Amino acid sequence: MKKITFLGLSFLVCLSVVGQTPKKPAAKSSSATSSLARPKLVVGIVVDQMRYDYLYRYYDQYTEGGFKRMMNEGFNCRNNHYAYALTVTAAGHASVYTGSVPAVNGIVGNEWFDVIAKQEVYCVEDSTVKTVGSTNPSVGKMSPKNLLTSTVTDQLRIATNFRSKTIGIAIKDRGSILPAGHTANAAYWFDSKTGNWVTSTFYMDDLPQWAKDYNAKKMPSAYLQKGWDLLLSADSYGQSSPDDVAWEGKLPGAKKPVFPYELAGLAGDAFGVVTDTPWGNTITKEMAIEAVKGENLGKGKDTDFLAISFSSTDKIGHRVGPNSVEQQDDFLRLDREFADLFNFLDSWVGKGEYTVFLTADHGVVDVPGFAAEHKLPSGLVDRKLLTAAVTGALNDTFGKDKYVISTDNNQLYLDHDLLKKKKLKVSDVAEVVREAALKVPGIADIVDLSDMGKAPLNTYQLELYKNNVNAKRSGDIQVLAQPGWFYGTSTGTSHGTPYNYDTQVPFIMFGWGVKKGETLRRTYVSDIAPTIASLLHILPGSGNIGNAVEEALKK
């Protein structure tokens, strides 16, 4: 009886085991399944002097693969602004990549006055390094040493124990060096004297072979011979003023600012004129593609970063302004360059495997001649008149002497030794300067930067100027121009103010990890770096003040 019971129980146990669903064996861990998901490549694009409205002004003439692709596939921050007042190239590039402002990262302008050394400082100058890639000794004495904080490109390098590659490329040295950061594998910029792309010994002692090969093609010479003619028929430029107007500046060697342009180099600057045309954007794109291929970017296990700045848009814009046929043609051509770049990246990295962001380092004001013709408030501040008025008032009040030792960034740097000797305070000088300056046409106000709590500014502008002031690099008194006014000549235009035409720039992301959509809430250029940092799961830069645009990112 016991034997039968035992057999019966055994049979029931067997049935129970057979009836159970077999468990799947535990998955073996592998680098492919356990590694953190990131894009293979991030491409940061800064278009020098791209006002926000250019996205839509020429929209109907853009191709599907350039600006439209970014807007239609990606996330568009349509109310994006700089959070500081002096909107210039170096400060803009530094803010984009540090997520910071000049008060923190130290890049208060393209130049500033060193009150200790008593000399002018260029934003990326470095006398301790040498030129690599050219016989021009001065063009390569550059590095990021004056940038006081780390960049998102630095943080990516640190996060991957320096396995990620980061490379900067721009015609302007500052447009390449500041985005690439302190730890970059390389930054390359253009030498208009020789037509070569160069770097400095801060990064390397010799150009890589791929860069030598591109320089050997002599593409600037080839484009110089092509000249510059319209991309489309002349009647297609209805978004612009007539081609020949009095307020446009001329290209070197040109008799009039009209198409077609024949291009001729100048003695000592043989290829500078190429960068004053859309061909400058072409050679920038070509150099960027060669860098991707030559450095095998986007092919490794870790995310790589390519920082590109297109400088020719700024050179053209300064000369002829935002309402010119030249600038319209420039952006239509830039759109095609972007389409070429994205098509290349699709084939090289894989569509959807890379992330791109687009922004600008500043906007631009309408040319005063154009504005006056259309009854808009504008004008040119007479710098000589302003200087004479301020100097005269100071001499009359405190005795004849040299109180102002520099005027970088429309700021007055005062001689503090002289002030101590005369027992004067900055506020004493500022009061006299203000009374004199307000009599000059186009001057809105002055601000004593040593005591901004008493500044006669609205809350919004005061915050922008506070974000600009670095104690060791900024001046003592800021001179503000009225909206639409700037220091310049009767042709061309400029930027560098706290007004909307200078502060509002694009911010679009598309590609890996980016949602499709847009927002009209106010975002800031300092939000770009932390947004990319969040996408990559890394720390933002050491001086970051921005916040990630979280609605742009996939969870």
Image (cartoon, helix red, strand yellow):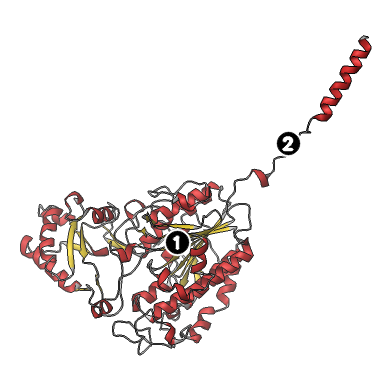
Task: From the top left corner, tell me how far across and down residue 132 is, in percent.
Answer: 50, 67
Q: In this rendering, is residue 228 above or below 82?
A: below
The number of numbered discs placed on residues in the rendered structure image is 2
Task: From the top left corner, tell me how far across and down residue 345 is, in percent.
Answer: 59, 65
Q: Is residue 495 left or right of residue 544?
A: left
Q: In this rendering, is residue 214 above or below 430?
A: below
- Could you tell me which secondary element the residue under label 1 belongs to? helix
The N terminus - image quarter: top right
Residue under label 2, please give it: 26
Q: Is residue 280 visible?
A: no
Q: Is residue 206 visible?
A: yes
Task: From the top left corner, tell me how far across and down residue 512 is, in percent.
Answer: 56, 56
Q: Which residue is at 19% across, 74% downward? A: 382
Nearer to us in this view, 390 or 80: 80
- Could you tell me which secondary element the residue under label 2 belongs to? loop
Q: Crowdedness of circle 2 by 10 Å Cα count: few (<14), some, many (20+)?
A: few
- In the figure, residue 248 lies in which quadrant? bottom left
Nearer to us in this view, 46 or 222: 46
Marked residue nearer the N-terminal end (1 or 2): 2
The tag on residue 299 is: none
Give amino acid for label 1.
Ile
Task: From the top left corner, tell me how far across and down residue 480 is, in percent.
Answer: 21, 63
Q: Crowdedness of circle 1 by 10 Å Cα count: few (<14), some, many (20+)?
A: many
Q: In this rendering, is residue 23 above or below 500?
A: above
Q: Which residue is at 82% across, 25% downward? A: 16
Give amino acid for label 2.
Ala
Residue under label 1, please give it: 177
Q: Is residue 426 left or right of residue 339?
A: left
Q: Nearer the viewer, mark 1 or mark 2?
A: 2
What separation in Å lies between label 1 and label 2 (alpha carbons)? 49 Å
